[in-house]
Image (cartoon, coloured by chain):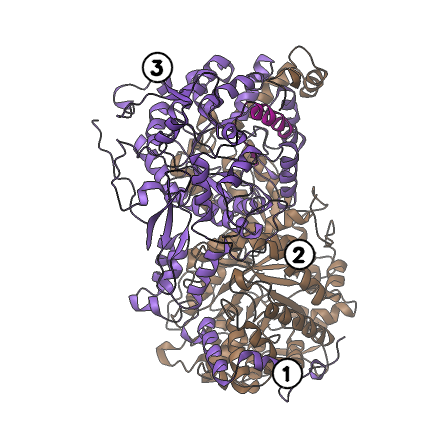
Chain colours: A brown, B purple
Amino acid sequence: MNRTIPPITTGPLSASRKIHVPGTLHPIRVPLREISLTGEAPLTVYDSSGPYTDCAGTIDISQGLRDVRGSWLQDRGDVESYSGREVTAADNGFAEGKRLTPVFPVPRDPLRAREGRAVTQLAYARAGIITPEMEYVAIRENEGRKAAYSRDGEAFGAGLPALVTPEFVRSEIAAGRAIIPANINHRELEPMIIGRNFLVKINANIGNSAVTSSMEEEVEKMVWAIRWGADTVMDLSTGRNIHNIRDWILRNAPVPIGTVPLYQALEKVGGIAENLTWEIYRDTLIEQAEQGVDYFTIHAGLRLHMIPMTARRVTGIVSRGGSIMAKWCLHHHRESFLYEHFAEICDIARAYDVSFSLGDGLRPGSIADANDEAQFAELRTLGELTKIAWAKDCQVMIEGPGHVPMHKIKANMDEQLKHCHEAPFYTLGPLTTDIAPGYDHITSAIGAAMIGWFGTAMLCYVTPKEHLGLPDRNDVKTGVITYKLAAHAADLAKGHPGAQARDDALSRARFDFRWEDQFNLGLDPETARAMHDETLPKEAHKLAHFCSMCGPKFCSMKISHDIRAVSQKAEGMEQMAAKFREGGELYVPAGHIGEPAE
Amino acid sequence: MNRTIPPITTGPLSASRKIHVPGTLHPIRVPLREISLTGEAPLTVYDSSGPYTDCAGTIDISQGLRDVRGSWLQDRGDVESYSGREVTAADNGFAEGKRLTPVFPVPRDPLRAREGRAVTQLAYARAGIITPEMEYVAIRENEGRKAAYSRDGEAFGAGLPALVTPEFVRSEIAAGRAIIPANINHRELEPMIIGRNFLVKINANIGNSAVTSSMEEEVEKMVWAIRWGADTVMDLSTGRNIHNIRDWILRNAPVPIGTVPLYQALEKVGGIAENLTWEIYRDTLIEQAEQGVDYFTIHAGLRLHMIPMTARRVTGIVSRGGSIMAKWCLHHHRESFLYEHFAEICDIARAYDVSFSLGDGLRPGSIADANDEAQFAELRTLGELTKIAWAKDCQVMIEGPGHVPMHKIKANMDEQLKHCHEAPFYTLGPLTTDIAPGYDHITSAIGAAMIGWFGTAMLCYVTPKEHLGLPDRNDVKTGVITYKLAAHAADLAKGHPGAQARDDALSRARFDFRWEDQFNLGLDPETARAMHDETLPKEAHKLAHFCSMCGPKFCSMKISHDIRAVSQKAEGMEQMAAKFREGGELYVPAGHIGEPAE
C-alpha cells in the first residue's frame, strides 16, 4: 500500500451507544442503538451503521470488517472453498500503474455451494431450517421491544406481527414474501430482511463514474450512507477499477451490497452494447458472486417485443440497464440474452445465495409515461421470472418506478402484488412530479412514503442531484435522511407495532423542552442542533422553555404547561370538563352566538 | 427617512418575462410568466411574484407598489374614505427613537363600506356580480391556456373545469367553496383565489419575533417568498414595531397578507394572556383592517369545554393562538371572547372584506395527538362559525393540522368537507412523522401533497427550521419550493387541466438534452444549474448528450435516442412490434425459458 488511506467516519451517533442482543437459537449478537435521554428511559432503535459506530474495536479498512458469518456457513456444511476465478485486467478496465486501485490486501478464497446443494435462505426456509441469519433479523426487527407499542394503521393486507419471531422470518422467506440478501462470500454482513411485513428499508446508491472517484471515497460514501441509516448500498460504479473498488467496499460493508452486473459487462466490451455476449455477462456474474455481492439487478424482464411500446413515450427508456439491453436486442434483432439464459443465471445465484432484484428496465422516466403498456408488460414478465427463480430456490425482489403521479401509485403496488406473487417490491421513489430538478429527493419522498405505506418493502433513495449530477457527501446524507423519514412515515401508516415509540419519545421531549433529547431522538441530531443554535446558541437555551421561533411570550408549549398547572391546581380537568358540558353559567349555547345560520 | 433601504431582490426569473393578459369584462391586465425555451414554444405559467420580476418599471419600497384596485373600488360606489383610527404607541409596542420602525412615508386614508353595505366578494357573488377581482383570477388560473391539457387524475369530488370562466369563479365564491382574500384597503393586490376547484395554493409565513428582525428584512422576505411562488404571505410578527412593519409589508405586497390579530393584541397587554379583552382585540381588528390585511386567523372555535380534552395529549396545545385563548378561558373560567363576539367580528370583516381563516387552536402537535376528540370538536365548531360568517357575507377558509400520520390524513379532509360545508381548507403540512427535526419541510410535504390531492385548497409551508428556530432567507426559499412541488403534485393527481403541461415540457427538454430548458422549466433554475455545474461546469456540457451521473457511455437517454434512430431506419416500430407479437424466429415463447414455474 503506497497510498494514504483517509480517515473513515467513525464514532457513535449523538448520545448513542451500541448494544448487542444475544440469540437464543444461535450464538449471535445483534447490534442495536441505544439513545440515552435525560428525562426518561433510553430508547433503542434499529442500527444499520455497523462497527463504525461502535466505541469498542478499531477500524482498519485495509483489513476489512470482522468475519460475522464464517462459522455459520461452515456449520451448515454445504459450502466449499475453491480458488476462484482469476481476476483479469479487463475486470478493472485495464487500469494500470498509479491508475490501478490496489488489490484488497487480505486475500480470501471464495465459497460456493457443494455440488447439487442450494445454499440460499429460501432453500433453508423451505426445508424448515431457521438459520442464524433468520434469528438475527428477527431480533433486529424488534428493536429491543418486548411487546407491541400503540398502533392503528391501515396495512393494505400486510400482516405485521406484534413481535417478529425467527419462525415468522422463516415462514415469510419460504413464502417468497421476504428476502435476506446474504451472499455466502459476504461474511462481514450483519443480516437484514426486506419484506412487506417488516420495517420498510432504504437503499443508497454509491459508485464512481467516468467523472472519477477513488476507492477511499467510495468506501467512505458507503460508511457515511449506513451511518445515517441506509439498509443496503448499491455500488453502481462504471469506468475503471470496478473490480478492486468493489472488493474494498464489500470487505468493509456490514450491509448488503447490490450491483448491476450489466454495467461491468458493458465496460468489458468497451461500452459497445451490441458487443455484449452471454459469456461475458455470465463470467461477470461469477466474478461478482465470488466477491460477495448480495444482490444483482437483472433486467431480464425487458423483452424484444416490448421495445416498440416505448416509441411514443416522452422520455423513452430511462433505465440504464434497460436501454443497454434494448439496444442489444434491436441491434441483433434477438430476444434478450438475460431472458433466454435466466435459468442459468439462477443456477449461479443459487450457488452463492445472491438475491435477485429484477430490474424494471422500462420504468417510466416522466409523469407522462407512468403506468403505461411497456411498464406493465415488463412487470408481468418479472412475475414470470419470479416463479422461475423460486423454482431454483433463489430469493427475489422486484424493482419498481420511477416517475408516477400520486393517483397512479397505488396501482403500481396492486399490480406488483398481483403479478409478482407478493415478492418484495423495491421502488425508486417514485417522483410525483417532474418539475423540481434539485429537489427530487422531495418529489420522490412523497411517492416513496406512499408506496411504502401501500406495501413496498424497500425504497431506493433519490438525492437532490438526481437528473443533474453525481451526489457528493452532503447529497448522500440528505438522500438517506429523507428516505429514512419517508420509510418511517410508511411504517407509522401501516401500523408497525414499534414505529410510533420514537415519535412519541421525541414529542414528549419537545413538550418538556428537553432540547438535547429532541435533537438526539431525531434522524439527524447534528443538523437539528445546528439549526437551533443559529438563533439561540447559548448552552442555557438548551434548557429554555421556548425557542427562537416564537420567543418566550408566545410559546404555545410553555402556555400549555401553564394551563395544565392552573387547571390541575384548581380542580381536576375531568371534573371541569363535566361541569362545562352540563352547561353552567359559563357555558354559552351555540344558538346564542351571532345570528342564525343562513 | 434616515435609514438606508437595502436593495430588494428584483429582476425576472431565469429565461422568463412577464406578460399581461387583458380582461374582456373589466379593464384589467393579468400578469403571467412566460418561460422561453430553445427547442419549443414558450411555456406560460402562473406568476405570484408581482412587479418585482417585471423588467418594466422600478421598485421603490418607500413608495409602495402601484395602486391596482383603486379604480375598481371606486367604480363599485359602495365604499367611503375616512380618517381612520389613530395609530398609538401601543400599536408598535412603545418602540421609540431609533428603535421605532419609521412610518410608511406615503399616507393614505382607509376605505370602509358605506353604512349598511357589504363590500365582500361573497356579497357580490351572491348578488350575481362578476367583479374585476373575479375576472382577474379566472384569467390567472388558466395560465394562458386555451383548452384543457391531458388530465387523468382522481379528484375526490372536486370539479375542475377545463377552463376557468369569470362566472365559474363567481359561482364558486357564492357557494362558499372559494375565496378571494382582498381587503379593500389592499389596493396593491393582484387578486388570487383559494378553493378546491382551482390550483392548489401555498402560503409562506414571515415575521419578526422577540429575537428581532427589521422592516427591510421582512419586506425582502416577503418579496423573496413570492419570487419563488408563495401565493399568500402571513405576517406573524410579534414584539415591537408590528404596526409599522405591517404597513411596509402591505404597501409592497402584490399577494394577500394574512395575520393573527391575537398576536398583536397580546403585545398590547404586555404578553399577559389573562389581560386580553374583547375591546383591545376589537380595536386591533380595526387597526389591521384599515391597513389592508386580507385575511385574519381567528381562533374562535376553541371553546372552554374543549380544553380538558387536551389533558392527556402528548403535546397539549401547540397553536400559539390556541394556547393563548385556552389560558384566557381557564383563567377567567369563561367562554372565549372570540366565540362570544364572533358576529361582531364578522361585522368588521364585512366592512373591509377581510376574509377569515378560522384557526385550529387545537390542532395536533404530534403523531400521538392526531385526529383526537379535541381536534374534531373544534372542527365542528369551525363549521358552525362558517355559517355565521356566511350569513354576514364574509369569506371563510378553515385551518387544519398539523401532525398527522398518512393513514389519518384523508379523514381530516372528509371531516372538514362534511362539517365545514365545503369552505376551503388551509392546512399546515401535515407532518407525517415527528422524528425528523431539521427536515420537517419534507415530513410535511408528504402530508401536504396528499391532503392537497384530497381537496385542500391552500398549503401553509413548513421550513427546515420548524420546531428549531426562525427561518432565514434560504429556509424561506426551501420551504416555498418544497410546497410548490407538493401543491403541483396535488394538482397533477387531482387531474388539473393544465398541470401536466409543465412536467411534459420539462421531460421533453430532459430527453432532448436541452439542459438550459430543463433548468428554466424547473421550480428553481438557479439551484438546478448550480448542481449540474458542480460536476460538469463547462458551457459546452450544457449541450452535452449526457451528464455526470452516468457519463456518456451509460446515458440511458442517449441510448434511447440511438434506439429510436436505429429502429426508425430499419422499419417502423409498430411493424416491428407486430412482427414480434406474431412470433417469428426471434420470438422465444415463455415456456422455453428456464424451467417450469415452481
Q: Which residues are magenta?
A: B379-401
Q: Is residue B78 left or right of residue B67?
A: right
**Chain identifier of the residue bearing label 1 in the image:** A
Q: Is residue B388 magenta?
A: yes
Disc 3 to disc 1, how far (Cα)?
86 Å
Other-residue count near label 3 (Cα within 10 Å), few / some / many at <14 / 14–19 / ≥20: few
Q: Is residue A286 above or below residue B8?
A: below
Q: Residue at x 32, y 32 (%)?
A: B67
Other-residue count near label 2 (Cα within 10 Å), few / some / many at <14 / 14–19 / ≥20: many
Which residue is label 2 attached to? A455
Q: Is residue A22 above or below residue B296?
A: below
Q: Disc 2 marks which amino acid?
A: Gly
> Which quadrant holds the N terminus of chain B?
top left
Q: Residue at x 40, y 24 (%)?
A: B77
Q: Is residue B413 magenta?
A: no
Front of the two marks 3 and 1 = 3
Q: Disc 3 marks which amino acid?
A: Glu
> Which quadrant holds the C terminus of chain B?
bottom right
Q: Position of residue B260 (x, y in %)?
A: 47, 27
Q: Quadrant of residue B92?
A: top left
**Chain identifier of the residue bearing label 2 in the image:** A
Disc 2 to disc 3, how far (Cα)?
62 Å
Q: Secondary structure at mark 1?
A: helix
Q: Residue furthest left?
A: B2
Q: Position of residue A191 (x, y in %)?
A: 63, 62
Q: Secondary structure at mark 2?
A: loop
Which residue is label 1 attached to? A340
**Chain identifier of the residue bearing label 3 in the image:** B
Which residue is label 3 attached to? B86
Tally the numbered discs: 3
